């Protein structure tokens, strides 16, 4: 059967734009692709990728005295892992990083302090290197069987030592109220109260989502009620409009937001702004400022130094579990697309109310003692024998 052309040839005018090879990206096209990829990522992700790649380049140069190039040899990735991951030795935990190299990385500003980094840091740098190889389209040493096995065994070794990822404490209702109590009626206090309540009560917003709040996507919808339209988030990078894109800010949170809007005099653009000397409202807050505000208010409240911006999110989920908010409603507010990551919060909250864990204090042990006797002297269904007199 004769093949047919899907598109009939047409006469088109010739335009002098230069001839390109369709099988190869031109230099300017490659630059445009890189720019679009970078613009599509969050600023925090871009910074973390850049920092990880700078670290790889510095370590590689100091270790091998040559510039890093893709693909990185499998042996070099294995060396990176044993340089940074601790293992048990007769003298205690140790890694293969030469002390002089470690100190040089610190002095160069590539790491904060000498010593082995956290397992999560090593794995993040490994994933960034893997992503770089994926984008290049060549062989990926991170996916090599030897590297994958080394990483899997290292995870198990760290877990056996009881070393788990560091999770920030959750800001549940009690610490939140303590932090709010530090917010006075100054311009900064009014802003911080509005920011904390906005982030917590609307579903535990991430710090970038808080700073993305504008007068264009946040509107008053009734007495003591605002609605924040969240289009772009970690689980919605494309910015699609979803049924749960509207996040309510109600009651006390709405009052605080309205007070900040009124005091700041703002009418457009970003809602949460820097406050400069003389109580002048400046430019939009950066996401890192949300972390700083959380830490500062926690310190003023006399709370432990275990809170960060994500504590608002984990605290909201934990408090929702404590107050028996349905899982589906919690997910609609937080924006989680999978229940798996929330189940742990709900189980942790339920464990505090566990009847089984309180048997010693509820008198249940009296019944269990009787049951033990039944097993000792026979079935509880038959006549019980009397204990012999002492």
Image (spheres, rainbow, N blue to C red):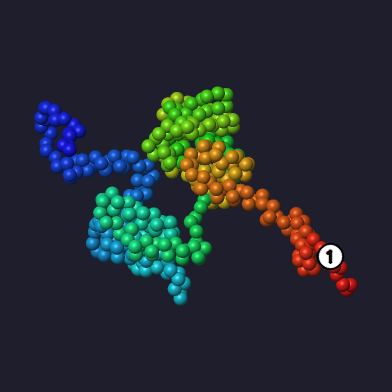
> To which quarter of the image does residue 153 belong?
bottom left
Q: Which residue is mark 1?
A: 384
Name the image quarter holding residue 130: bottom left
Q: Is residue 293 above or below residue 381?
A: above
Disc 1 is placed on an element classified as loop
Residue 353 vs residue 304, the one in the foreground: 353
Q: Is residue 120 above or below residue 245?
A: below
Can see residue 304? yes
Residue farthest right in this picture: 389
Question: Residue shown at 57%/27% (left/top)?
Answer: 224
As drawn, is 55 to the left or to the right of 282?
Answer: left
The percent position of residue 212, horizontal first and vertical second, equals: 43, 35
Judge left or right: residue 214 versus residue 390. Answer: left
**Residue lying furthest front in this view?**
1
Outermost residue on the bottom side: it is 90
Residue at 37%, 49% (x, y): give it.
48
Left or right side of 307 for 269: left
Q: Residue at position x 43%, y 59% from top? A: 119
**293 left or right of 123?**
right
Q: Is residue 80 visible?
A: no
Q: Is residue 120 above or below residue 64?
A: above
Residue 344 in the image: state x and y as whole percent: 55, 50
Q: Nearer the viewer, residue 184 or 229?
A: 229
Q: Can you say whether 39 is above or below 223 in the image? A: below
- Asked whether 343 or 268 is in front, the reply is 343
Query: Is 140 or 389 nearer to us in this picture?
Result: 389
Q: Position of residue 150 (x, y in %)?
A: 38, 64
């Amino acid at each position: 059967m004769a093949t047919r052309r899907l598109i009939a040839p047409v006469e088109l005018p010739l335009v002098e734009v230069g001839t390109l090879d369709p099988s190869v990206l031109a230099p300017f096209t490659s630059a445009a692709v890189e720019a679009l990829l970078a613009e599509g990522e969050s600023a925090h992700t871009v910074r973390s990728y850049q920092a990880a790649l700078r670290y790889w380049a510095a370590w590689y140069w100091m270790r091998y005295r040559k510039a890093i190039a893709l693909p990185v040899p499998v042996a070099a990735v294995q060396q990176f892992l044993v340089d940074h991951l601790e293992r048990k030795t007769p003298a205690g935990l140790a890694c293969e990083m030469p002390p002089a190299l470690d100190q040089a990385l610190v002095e160069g500003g590539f790491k904060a302090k000498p010593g082995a980094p956290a397992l999560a840091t090593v794995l993040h740098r490994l994933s960034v290197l893997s992503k770089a190889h994926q984008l290049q389209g060549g062989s990926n040493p991170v996916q090599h069987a030897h590297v994958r096995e080394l990483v899997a065994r290292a995870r198990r070794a760290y877990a056996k030592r009881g070393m788990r990822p560091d999770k920030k404490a959750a800001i549940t209702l009690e610490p939140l109220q303590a932090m709010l109590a530090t917010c006075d009626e100054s311009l900064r206090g009014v802003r911080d109260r509005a920011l904390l309540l906005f982030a917590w009560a609307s579903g535990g917003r991430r710090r970038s989502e808080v700073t993305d709040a504008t007068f264009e996507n946040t509107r008053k919808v009734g007495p003591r009620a605002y609605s924040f339209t969240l289009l772009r988030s970690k689980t919605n990078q494309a910015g699609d409009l979803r049924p749960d894109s509207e996040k309510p800010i109600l009651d006390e949170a709405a009052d605080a937001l309205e007070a900040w809007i009124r005091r700041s005099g703002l009418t457009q653009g970003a809602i949460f702004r820097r406050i400069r000397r003389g109580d002048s409202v400046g430019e939009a807050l950066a996401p890192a400022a949300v972390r700083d505000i959380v830490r500062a208010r926690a310190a003023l409240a006399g709370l432990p130094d275990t809170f960060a911006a994500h504590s608002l999110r984990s605290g909201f989920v934990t408090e929702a579990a404590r107050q028996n908010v349905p899982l589906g409603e919690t997910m609609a507010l937080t924006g989680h697309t999978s229940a798996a990551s929330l189940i742990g919060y709900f189980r942790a909250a339920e464990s505090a109310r566990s009847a089984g864990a309180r048997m010693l204090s509820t008198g249940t042990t009296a019944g269990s003692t009787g049951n033990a006797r039944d097993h000792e002297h026979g079935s509880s269904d038959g006549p019980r024998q009397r204990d012999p007199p002492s």
